[in-house]
Every structure is written in C-alpha cells, then in structure tokens.
Image (cartoon, rainbow, N blue to C red):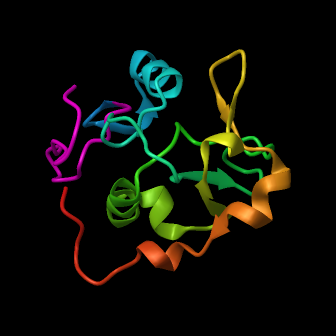
Amino acid sequence: MKRGLPRPSNKAGTPIPYIAESGAKLGTAHLTRRLEVTQGWLCQVCGEPVGWPAYGVVCVDGSRWQPDWLLDHGLLHGACMRLSLDHCPVLGTWSGLLLLELNRADVTMTEHFQLVVPATVQERTAIDVSRFRQPGPATP
C-alpha cells in the first residue's frame, strides 16, 4: 500500500488507512504494516513518520481496547486525525474514547511492539475532540 495523502479509497469512497488490511477490512490492521507503523513511529493513516506532538486514541471504558492506555493501531498526524474522525464509524460516535496529544516521552513501546501511554499522563495530554471537528469534509 502506498504511503502519504491523499489516501486511496475503497468502493464505498472511504479513505483506506495505511495500516488497514484492505479496503474491505478497514477496522482490521494488516499485521506487517501494523508492526512497521509501531516500530517506525509512523502515522497509522498515511504511513509517514509522525512529528511531535502526535495524536492517539485510547478507550477509557474498557469495552474495545485494554484499559491500560493501549493506543489503537498507533499514532496520527493532526490532519490524519481529522480525516479519521470524518470517515471512521468507530471514531465518529466518540463513545468511551479519549483523544491524547502526545510528545515522544509520553509513549512507550512494549516488547510486543504495542504503543502504551501511562495513565499518569492522561490529564496532561487529553484534549477536546471538537478541536478536529471543523466545518466541511476533510480531504481523503
């Protein structure tokens, strides 16, 4: 899959994140690209290196991801966060999720190549998701 923006779209016109298994399986991470994104500190949406601050999404109700601040599939650029909010059905509801604005020191990588944010940084890094909800569609 190519890196960068704009993202290719599936048959429904939804942008395909770099980390996705395929256009038909947007919510499933391609294992090789997931490892590449995590190890290389790449954006999960466009596949390009993240700058700092970067953004991450964590589940705070424990229903979808581990409650210990495991980042869902990795980090995102600001533009890619907005693109995700505009097109991802899970993020679109924003129920039980928290958006974090992170610096490199806020994120650790486990021995299983998962990105984790210690709960101690929650209050300092949590931001209002409405910051990314601007009028008009994001460019895919």
The residue depicted at 30 percent of the width and 41 percent of the height is 46
Tell me where the magenta segment starts and ends, as one range: 1-20
Residue 131 horizontal/vertical position (percent): 47, 77
The residue depicted at 16 percent of the width and 48 percent of the height is 6
Decide which of 85, 43 is in the foreground and name it: 43
Decide which of 135, 64 is in the foreground and name it: 135
Q: Is residue 66 visible?
A: yes
Residue 140 horizontal/vertical position (percent): 19, 55
The quadrant in which the N terminus is found is top left
Decide which of 94, 33 is in the foreground and name it: 33
The residue depicted at 52 percent of the width and 21 percent of the height is 39
Decide which of 64, 129 is in the foreground and name it: 129
Count all numbered tags in the image, as a single digit. 0
What is the chief secondary structure element of the magenta stretch?
Answer: loop
Magenta stretch encompasses residue 11: yes
Vertical side of 64 occupied by 99: above or below:
below
The residue depicted at 79 percent of the width and 46 percent of the height is 67
